[in-house]
Image (cartoon, helix red, strand yellow):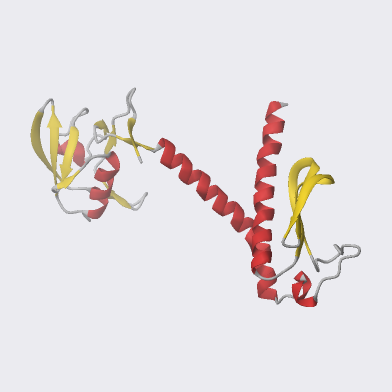
Amino acid sequence: MTTLLATLLVLSVLIVIHEFGHLLAAKRLGIKVLRFSIGFGPRLFGIEVGGTEYRLSSLPFGGYVRMAGEEGLAEPGVETETEGRFSAKPVWARSIVVLAGPMGNLVFAGIILFGIVYTLGIETYKPVVGQIEEGSPAASAGLLPGDRIISADGRSVQFWSDLVDAVAECDGSEMRLIVDRDGQRIEKALVPRYDETIDRWRVGVGPWVGTEVGTVRR
């Protein structure tokens, strides 16, 4: 039951955001918006601002926008000038109003994603060697599990993704790595190998995945 209510709540929020996108676009393009309702059914309460009724209805799941001139949605006793009717607007204007709904959902999703990333950060792997493929450039160079990559071709490596980027940009030329092994810094040279199956350069090494997966960065 809780799952069902949570699902309905999420869907309701998405629908309201979707309809709010229609509302903003319609207002911007000079279309008369008669009503913006959160929920369906009889009105509980509401206010009128700028010729638009904003209401909360008795079934607070979803919502809708009612614009003047929408086909089949004539409001009894409401007269609207031709230029303020949805049906009187050019195709491009009506298209913008229609597309504003899904665009509102995309913007909302982007804001939520940004908030999550900003609050929690992005978990990344430390530049510590874990798995080494047999016969790979990393194995031939003598890299060992537990080695921490300090730099690649003079470029500082703070996260595992920095090493991946350096390998991708070397274009198959020899790379020089500075490695911290048990407190001692040593230099290793290796030549990445092109893997056609994934269309990129590789050295045959994976990150160390232990109880502490990585570092959180924002």
**In the image, what residue occupies the spot 66% across and 55% down?**
20
Q: Nearer the viewer, residue 104 or 143?
A: 104
Where residue 27 appears, as percent x and y from the top left, is 67, 65
| Any part of residue 9 in sight | yes
115 left or right, relative to 1: left
| Any part of residue 54 in sight | no
Q: Nearer the viewer, residue 164 or 15?
A: 15
143 left or right, relative to 90: left
173 left or right, relative to 116: left
**In the image, what residue occupies the spot 22% across and 37% down?**
135
- Quarter of the image that includes the C terminus: top left
**In the image, what residue occupies the spot 60% across and 52% down?**
105
Q: Would you place residue 39 above or below residue 5 in this image? A: below
Q: Farthest residue toward the top?
A: 211
Q: Would you place residue 12 above or below residue 183 in this image? A: below
Hey, which quadrant is residue 125 in on the image? Answer: top left
Where residue 175 appears, as percent x and y from the top left, is 15, 48
- Quarter of the image that includes the N terminus: top right
185 left or right, relative to 130: left
Q: Nearer the viewer, residue 140 or 106?
A: 106
**In the image, what residue occupies the spot 66% across and 53% down?**
18
Hey, which quadrant is residue 130 in on the image? Answer: top left
Where residue 154 appears, as percent x and y from the top left, is 13, 48
Where residue 72 appears, as percent x and y from the top left, is 86, 64
